[in-house]
Amino acid sequence: MEKRLEKATLGGGCFWCLEAVYENVKGVTDVASGYAGGHTDHPDYRSVCSGATGHAEVVQITYDPEVVSYEDLLDIFWTIHDPTTLNRQGADVGTQYRSVIFYHDDAQKKIAEVSKEKAQARYRDPIVTEIAPLSKFWPAEEYHQDYFRKNPHQGYCQAVVAPKVEKFKTHHKGWVK
């Protein structure tokens, strides 16, 4: 019998950060960096970075729900980025870096709303994470895929991505592959 895999699509700043974390989660079979939530077809990195397309940098996670639940993926999400800053994560500023959960169906929408409410207890400031339906996921250019794994010594990876991966491994030891 074939495994039933599901997808989750999340944005929380630079997609390299989220991709690097979720690639280390038990039950995750694939993570693709890409773009979602905008108003143009076939966006590319340059146009998304301009802020003109309305797209957010996101990751689309393919996972085995018998190993890791959507709730677990969201619990990780709340701890690996700051969901209280509007359109920014650290030095990355703009709507393309917004905190967003793109749900694939009504069940994911309900789970995301409950998860956001529970996560609010961890933060003094209000969570500004958008919860919206996924209309289309556009994969990013090939050089963005598996970026941290391919470029671990690059400056941004050392300064920004690596600490997020370590934070995940510290706070979610039971989920590390």
Image (tube, grey):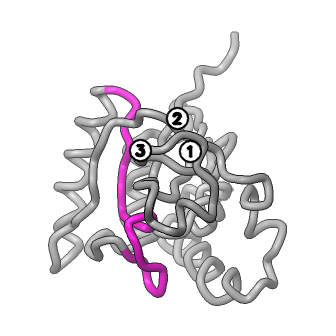
At 56% from the left and 56% from the top, the residue drawn is 175
Q: Are marks 2 and 3 in contact (CB under 8 Å)?
A: no
In the image, what residue type sits under mark 2?
Answer: Lys
Would you name the residue on which mark 1 appears? Answer: 60
Location of the N terminus by quadrant is top right
Give the secondary structure at mark 3: loop
**Which sits in the foreground, 92 or 84?**
92
- Of labels 1 and 2, earlier in sequence is 2
**Which sits in the foreground, 56 or 131?**
56
**Which sits in the foreground, 64 or 15?**
15
At 27% from the left and 54% from the top, the residue drawn is 130
Would you name the residue on which mark 2 appears? Answer: 7
Give the secondary structure at mark 2: strand
- Of labels 3 and 1, earlier in sequence is 3
Q: Are marks 1 and 2 in contact (CB under 8 Å)?
A: yes
At 33% from the left and 36% from the top, the residue drawn is 133
Q: How many marks?
A: 3
Would you name the residue on which mark 3 appears? Answer: 39
Q: Position of residue 20 (x, y in %)?
A: 65, 64
Q: Nearer the viewer, mark 2 or mark 3?
A: 3
- Of labels 2 and 3, earlier in sequence is 2
Q: Is residue 161 visible?
A: yes
Drawn side of residue 53 relative to residue 99, left or right: right
Cα separation, mark 1 vs mark 2, equals 7 Å
In the image, what residue type sits under mark 1?
Answer: Gln
For residue 42, which quarter of the picture?
A: top right
Q: Position of residue 33 (x, y in %)?
A: 63, 53
- Magenta region: which residues? 88-105
For residue 30, which quarter of the picture?
A: top right
Q: Nearer the viewer, mark 3 or mark 1?
A: 3
In the image, what residue type sits under mark 3?
Answer: His
